Image (tube, helix red, strand yellow):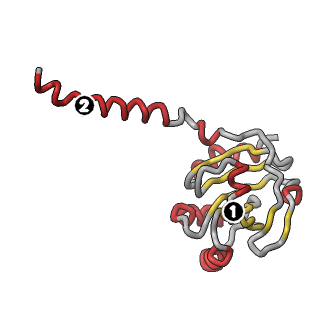
Amino acid sequence: MSRLIRWFPLLLGAALFALLWHALTPVGDARNDAGLGRPLPTLPLTTLEGRSLTTEALLGHPFLLNVWASWCANCRAEHPLLLELGETVPVVGLNYRDKPAAAQAWLTSAGNPYRVVLDDGDGRLSLALGVVGTPETWLVGADGRLLARHTGILTKALWQTRFAPLLEAP
């Protein structure tokens, strides 16, 4: 019996950890479904080059909105796919809490898949979108509605199963 008492705190701690882990882990794809169906936030936008832009200027055709940063290793891992996708679908970059010079240097060396890159140095647009971290990719409909979301590295399989069918839908 004294042996069981000695292990009781460890077992209780492990049980509490498992309970918390289960409670805090999203069920299914809940994190990627958050925010879908709502419109793209309307905030004053600035490009990486310092030009002003409105949300309305982005609308009229579906596009990918990719949240990235030059300091993000996972963003670098998904970059080749974005270069490939940029040939068939417009990709808009949202440079998250980055220095414009560092972002420009990265795009010059790695290639630029983006039609336009928005500067979100203060994180206001990312906050309005509900961005969890980088990279994060959204499919935005021609009317500005958020159709699909993926938090993490976008892969070809995810593109083909989650995003591409929405572009082909009437």
Which residue is painted at 69% across and 51% down in the image? 127
Q: Position of residue 24 (x, y in %)?
A: 49, 35
Query: With respect to residue 82, does 146 lie above or below?
Result: above
**Secondary structure beneath disc 1?**
loop
Nearer to us in this view, 167 or 116 = 116
Q: Tag on residue 95?
A: none
Q: Which residue is mark 2?
A: 9
Precedes in sequence: disc 1 or disc 2: 2
Callout 2 environment at 10 Å: few (<14), some (14 to 19), or many (20+)? few
Which residue is painted at 76% across and 47% down in the image? 167
> What amino acid is found at the position of numbered circle 1 in the picture?
Asp
| Residue sitting farthest toward the left | 2
Q: Tag on residue 122?
A: 1
**Secondary structure beneath disc 2?**
helix
Q: Position of residue 1 (x, y in %)?
A: 11, 20
Which residue is painted at 70% across and 61% down in the image? 94
- Looking at the rendering, which quadrant does residue 38 occupy? top right
> What amino acid is found at the position of numbered circle 2 in the picture?
Pro
- The C terminus: image quadrant: top right
Callout 1 environment at 10 Å: few (<14), some (14 to 19), or many (20+)? few
Q: Position of residue 83 (x, y in %)?
A: 65, 66
Nearer to us in this view, 159 or 104 = 104
- Looking at the rendering, which quadrant does residue 116 occupy? bottom right
Q: Position of residue 106 (x, y in %)?
A: 61, 75
Q: CA distance from mark 1 to mark 2?
A: 45 Å
Taking the image as shown, residue 67 lies to the left or right of residue 53, namely left
